[in-house]
Every structure is written in C-alpha cells, then in structure tokens.
C-alpha cells in the first residue's frame, strides 16, 4: 500500500490553523492519521486520527485534506514537520508519508501609514507608505500594490518589489509606492499584498479613498464633503473671524489706522504654531517705540524702533524665558516723523528668525492723502495734497509707488545679546 | 580658542544661545504707528521676505488686517457682534427641475451667544442625510445680521455612496447593497365605474394622492470598514440588530435611500420582522413603509423633524 504524498505546507498562524492537502493512491480510504513533530526536538506535539468515510473521487491518485486545528498545541515562531498515513476500507494501513516541514508564524500585518479607510486625499499622485509587521520577525520577501475602483474591481497592479531594506524605529519594514493618475472626485480602493520569505501571504485589506484635489488652498466660508462610507454630506462653516479686543473707536484715513499712541490687540481666532512670515506696513515717529508684540502669554517676540547714539535702528527681540535673542537692523538716516513708509517683514523658519525692513519711496514726500486737510491727524510735518493723480499714484496697491524697486535699507546684520 | 587657525567661540557673542523659540502665539499687539496693513502667512513656499505680501485670504493665512475702517483681521468682513443667526441652504444642481429650488436645511440662533460661542457654532460640522447617489449639490452658508441675509458663500459637492441607508436627523443605519432590497407600490386614488350604456368602465379620481408604499429587507449586519468584513458573531450581531429594530420602531420619520438614486421620506408601518433564512444566525429584517413627503420640500422636511428651521426663513 503506497504512502500518501503531502503537498507543500505554507506557513500559517497557529492560532488560526490550516488545512494540509495530500494525494493518495489506493482503495477507498476510511481514516487518516496525522502526526506533527517539533523539528528541533523531534518531540511529538500533535496526533489526530480521523476515521470518517471519505468520498472516492473516481480518479487515481485522489487528493485529500486534513485539518490542523487551533488546539493542536503548535506555537508561532516554531518549525514543525507533519506526516500522514491512510487507513483503507480493508483496514490496511499505508506507510507514513514523507515528512513535510512547515513554519508557524503569527499573522503578519500590512498597514497603510497616515491614511485610513474613508479618507479623502487631495493629490493626483499619492505616495503610499505601508508598514509591515510580523511578531516572529518573519521578513517580507516581496510585495505589490493594487488599485481598485469603488466596486473593488482591479484597475492596476504595481510591479512586484523586493526592496525591504527600509525600517522604522520599531523595526517594522517600510514599503513605498506612489499611486498615480488618480482622477478627481473618484472613489478608489488601495490594497497592498505581499509574501514572506517562507511563503506566508500578507494583505492590508481594502482602504477606501476618495481623490479630491480641487484647489486645496482656496479658502471658502463653507466646507462640504461627501461621506461615502456613511452615505451623507458633511458641511461645516469656516468663518475665520479675528477681531481686536479693544472697544475703542479708532481713526482711519484712507485705509490707514491711527495708532500713534494706541494699540490694537488680537487674542482669538488664530494660533501661530510654527513657521510664519509677517508683514507690517506703515509710518512711525523717529523715536524709541514698541511697534509690535507677538506673545504666547509666557514669552514674546517684540519689534521696536530704537534711537541711540544719534541713530535709529529696528530691534527684533525673541524672549523664551531663559534668554533673549536680538536682531538689530543697520542704522538708518534720520527722517521726519510719519513721512517715510516702512514695511517690516519678520520670518521664522525652523526656529531661525530674520528681520528685513523696506523703505518705500513715494512721489510726494508726504503720507497723508484725503479729501480734507489733516487737521485732526497727529502727523507733524505732513502737507496736504489735493492732486488726484498723486493720490492714485500713492494709494496704488500699497506696495510700490513708482517705477523703481524699493531699496532694502536695513537687512538683519547683527544678532546676539543686548547691545 | 583657536583650532587650525580658526577662532572657535572666541568672539563676544559667539557663545550666546543662538535661538529662542516662541510657539503657539495667540496674542498680537500692534501699536505706535500709522499703519496700512498687517498680515501673516504660514506659506513659506509661496512668499519670501519681500514687499509682496498676501492680500487674499487662503487656508495658509494667519491674519490680514487692511484697516479699511475696521480692525477685523479675519477672512470674513462681517462684525460678529451683529450676527444674530446663521442659515445653511442646499440645492440639487445636477437636476434641472430642482436646480433653483433652495432649501434651508440648517438654522442656528446666535443672538444670545458671546463672540467665541458664535464662531464655534458657525464652524461646527453638520450632516445632511438627504443626498442621493451621483448627484451634484450646492451648499451655501449665510450669516444673518439683524434679520438680513448677507454674504452667501457656497460650495458644490458630488454625492457618492453605495448601499442602502435609513436615516433620521441624528441617527443613521445602512447595509451593503447585496444584502438588501427595496420594492415599492405606487398608490393613487382611482376607481373604475361601469355605466349602463357603454361597454367599458370609466376611471374616476377625485384626489391628488400619489405616493409610494414599499417593503425593505436586508441583513443589516455591522460592517468592519477596515477589513471589509461583515461581523456575524452573535455577540456583535444580536445587539446591533436589536438596536436597529428599536430604531425602526421609534415612531420617527425617516429617510430611506438606495445607491441607485431612489429616495423617500417615510414612516415605518407596523410591524418589522426578524426572520431566519436557512440558518439561525442569518437574520433577515423586513419592514414595510409608507411615503409621507418629499425630501425636496421645506415643509415636509420640517414636519418630519429633519430641518428645524423657523418658518420665516423657509424658501419657496
């Protein structure tokens, strides 16, 4: 009586079990005896006798299977071998089959990083990152990415990749692939699949994605989005309202606010968490004054005009409670109060600060423009211009008032401790 | 200190702590000047330290104060103190018969709120369950200042979903499409009267009644969207299906809609059933329903409990 032949046993999770298939040539089988041994100690760990009748398929040899149950006592991370013998209807017992070795591994995971089922992506080409994790350190050998439509019909498959060298801080393998040519307003499914070095399959499952990359930077007072998973529309007001806390009635002149001896404070509706560029444009007196304060209630960034040694400079102070870092501008020539218009530009990038100050040339030598004389305006030294053309020339878009670029008169040149 | 001819930490300021970081800035004070504009952005890719600064609001803008007779530095040129109400309207633009049919779907009374509460209320996410699959909708938000609707801003969205959903204003149930069916009957009031001297009867209808009744059945199992697997375990399935039966029998009006574009405003008929189909744990929940209005009707949706909008703001 011929021995059965066991087919290759792929690695499997001992907590899930698997089915061993084998072929057998002979008369009607009525029972199967399965034994599993641990490969390093050769200890018998599982024995199962199945004595139910088997249906004869009519062809020779016949293919049969036997189940390895979850209570077989197998442990993930170990190697075993199995052997089988068959008992036929005449109570004849076959020889033991070949010993087929196999591994038990905990089910591996492939997880898309940074994107979840039902998410909306705002790009045409999405760089997917998948993390592969296997508790027993069974390495992944190859992997590929699939793209499906909303009904999970396969649209495209990537090539099979074998580069598994990139690891993250936890030892998980990082797999990368860029899905391209995603069509706006279309639902897709992403899926990553792979095979470990011992042949165990792994699968991320389907990740449902909506591609929506219409002008992501455009501000709108209302945001509306389709929730395909839950079958409804989500809408949300997006009203960015930032108002000064002062109840004071300020004076305005053609788009300029008068804050010569006053202040406006903004305390809600925004939060500057990290890098930024800030511009402040206007006229000041030739005096030592604090012009701008940015604060997180504990520490401050301050822009000041400072007059000493007969010169004026601009000083940017960044105080974090331990130390103050200062940025001083070059000294600038004397000017008549409220006659020279400046743009102060402050930038923070990667915790590095920069200050630039632009002096804007203007054609009239004055700053006040309006329909009546600036009697009530506290601006010594200004004159009143009625010329309409000059008015247009100055007002413009409030940036450049003649043909030449404004001169950068005071770049940041010195940083360090207090002068 | 010299190393290979170079001065290391030899100058007066070279050992200063170079950088002081101040994050999460929430207070800004501008003072002591005569200012035209004050603006800031986080978009360091688009802008550099030049004289070109942002004047149009984007999602990267921190603030823009142009001081045109106001200190407002936000994106909305309204005085929040005067905003008393907010409305949200929607219309189905992909259907020419309803393209001009705005419905007010949301109203928020802001009159008793302080400024921060108003902004929070204005920007709270809401849900509209009346969308049908593959349709294009336009939503508009409208602040109301002293009874006057101002600054309507809208955005369009394409509705897309699969499955069958049964929804109340604040509770939503669905099932995958292969497990559920909706069959309907159109009801009209019409009788046929025979006459003495003519061979054929005449149809007589004295009412405008014209509505659907229907039956819906499905498994209504919890669905794990991460694994795309229906959860059939008894300890998950039984409580879920029991809650669904409670939902069906809570006496509230509902919206029933299917992925194929059909939608009804319905009331559930007595009494839903839960029957086994072949196996004890393959449960088919069935219920009959009657159409009681239109989701495109401001009046019907108000009285069905969906759009709680005061009548003074109703469209049409």
Image (cartoon, coloured by chain):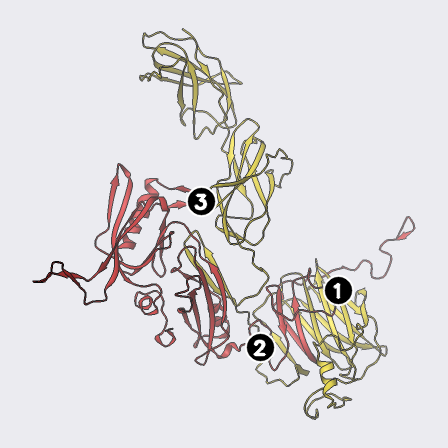
Chain colours: A yellow, B red
Determine which residue is flagged by label 2: A245
In this rendering, do the residues under marks 1 and 2 share a single chain?
A: yes
Q: Alpha-carbon distance for marks 1 and 3?
A: 53 Å
Assess whether mark 2 and mark 1 are in contact (beta carbons under 8 angstroms).
no
- The chain that hosts pointer 2 is A
**Residue B20: image tag:** none
Label 1 neighbour load within 10 Å: few <14, some 14-19, many 20+: some
Label 2 neighbour load within 10 Å: few <14, some 14-19, many 20+: few
Residue A381 location, x and y as percent?
Answer: 78, 89
Q: Which label lies toward us, 2 or 3?
A: 3
- Residue A126 lies, with reference to residue A358, above or below; the image says above
Q: Which label lies toward us, 1 or 2?
A: 1
Classify mark 3: helix, strand or loop: loop
Assess whether mark 3 and mark 1 are in contact (beta carbons under 8 angstroms).
no
Q: Left or right: B81 with respect to A325?
A: left
In this rendering, do the residues under marks 2 and 3 share a single chain?
A: yes
Q: A363 or A360: which is nearer to us?
A: A363
Residue B240 location, x and y as percent?
Answer: 33, 47
Q: Left or right: B226 with respect to A364?
A: left
């Amino acid at each position: 009586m011929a021995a059965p032949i066991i087919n290759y046993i792929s690695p499997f999770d001992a907590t899930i079990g698997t089915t061993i298939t084998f072929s057998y040539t002979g008369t009607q089988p009525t029972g199967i005896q399965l034994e599993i041994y641990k490969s390093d100690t050769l200890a018998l760990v599982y024995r199962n006798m199945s004595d139910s009748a088997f249906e004869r398929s009519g062809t020779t040899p016949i293919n049969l299977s036997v189940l390895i149950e979850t209570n077989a006592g197998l442990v993930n991370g170990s190697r075993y071998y199995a052997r089988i013998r068959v008992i036929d209807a005449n109570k004849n017992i076959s020889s033991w089959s070949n010993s087929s070795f196999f591994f038990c591994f905990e089910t591996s995971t492939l997880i898309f990083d940074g994107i979840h089922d039902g998410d909306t992506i705002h790009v045409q080409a999405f760089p997917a990152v998948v993390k592969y994790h296997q508790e027993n350190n069974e390495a992944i050998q190859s992997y590929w990415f699939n793209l499906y439509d909303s009904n999970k019909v396969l649209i495209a498959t990537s090539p099979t990749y074998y580069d598994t060298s990139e690891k993250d801080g936890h030892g998980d393998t990082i797999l990368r692939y860029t899905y391209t040519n995603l069509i706006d307003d279309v639902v897709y499914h992403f899926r990553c699949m792979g095979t470990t070095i011992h042949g165990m399959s792994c699968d991320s499952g389907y990740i449902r994605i909506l591609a929506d990359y219409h002008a992501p930077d455009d501000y709108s007072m209302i945001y509306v989005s389709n929730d395909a998973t839950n079958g409804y529309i989500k809408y949300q007001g997006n009203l960015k309202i930032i108002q000064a806390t002062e109840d004071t009635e300020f004076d305005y002149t053609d788009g300029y606010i008068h804050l010569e001896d006053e202040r406006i404070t903004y305390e809600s509706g925004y939060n500057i968490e990290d890098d930024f560029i800030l511009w402040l444009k206007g006229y000041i007196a030739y005096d030592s004054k604090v012009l701008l304060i940015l604060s997180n209630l504990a520490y401050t960034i301050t822009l000041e005009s400072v007059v000493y040694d007969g010169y004026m400079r601009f000083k940017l102070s960044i105080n974090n409670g331990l130390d103050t870092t200062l940025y001083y501008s070059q000294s600038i020539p004397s000017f008549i109060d409220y006659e020279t218009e400046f743009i102060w530009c402050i930038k923070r990038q990667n915790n590095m600060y920069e200050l630039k100050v632009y002096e804007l040339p203007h054609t009239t030598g004055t700053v006040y423009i309006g329909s009546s004389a600036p009697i009530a305006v506290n601006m010594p030294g200004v004159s009143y211009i009625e010329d309409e053309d000059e008015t247009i020339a100055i007002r413009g878009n409030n940036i450049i008032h003649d043909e030449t670029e404004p001169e950068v008169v005071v770049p940041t040149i010195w940083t360090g401790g207090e002068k | 200190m010299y190393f290979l001819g170079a001065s290391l930490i030899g100058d007066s300021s070279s050992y200063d702590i170079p950088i002081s970081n101040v994050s999460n800035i929430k207070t800004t004070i501008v003072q002591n000047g005569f200012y035209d504009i004050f603006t800031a952005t986080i978009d360091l890719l688009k802008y550099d330290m030049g004289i070109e600064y942002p004047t149009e609001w984007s999602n990267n803008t921190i603030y823009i104060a142009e001081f045109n007779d106001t200190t407002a530095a936000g994106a909305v040129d309204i005085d929040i103190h005067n905003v008393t109400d907010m409305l949200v309207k929607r219309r189905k633009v992909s259907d020419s018969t309803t393209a001009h049919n705005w419905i007010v779907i949301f109203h928020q009374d802001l009159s008793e709120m302080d400024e921060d509460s108003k902004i929070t209320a204005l920007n709270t996410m809401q849900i509209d369950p009346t969308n049908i699959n593959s349709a294009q909708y336009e939503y508009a938000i409208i602040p109301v200042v002293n009874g006057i609707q101002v600054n309507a801003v809208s955005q369009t969205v394409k509705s897309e979903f699969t499955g069958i959903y049964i929804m109340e204003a604040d509770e939503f149930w669905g099932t995958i499409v292969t497990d559920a069916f909706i069959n309907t009957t159109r009801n009209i009031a019409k009788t046929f009267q025979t006459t003495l001297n003519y061979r054929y009867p005449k149809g007589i209808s004295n009412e405008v009644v014209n509505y659907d009744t229907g039956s819906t059945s499905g498994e209504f199992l919890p669905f794990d969207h991460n694994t795309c697997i229906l959860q059939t375990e008894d300890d998950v399935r039984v409580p879920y299906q029991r809650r669904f039966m409670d939902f069906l029998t809570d006496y509230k009006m509902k919206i029933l809609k299917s992925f194929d574009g059909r939608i009804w405003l319905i009331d559930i008929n007595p009494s839903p059933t839960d029957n086994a189909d072949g196996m004890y744990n393959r449960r088919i929940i069935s219920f009959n329903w009657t159409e009681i209005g239109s989701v495109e009707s401001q009046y019907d949706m108000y009285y069905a409990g969906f759009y709680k909008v005061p009548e003074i703001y109703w469209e049409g």
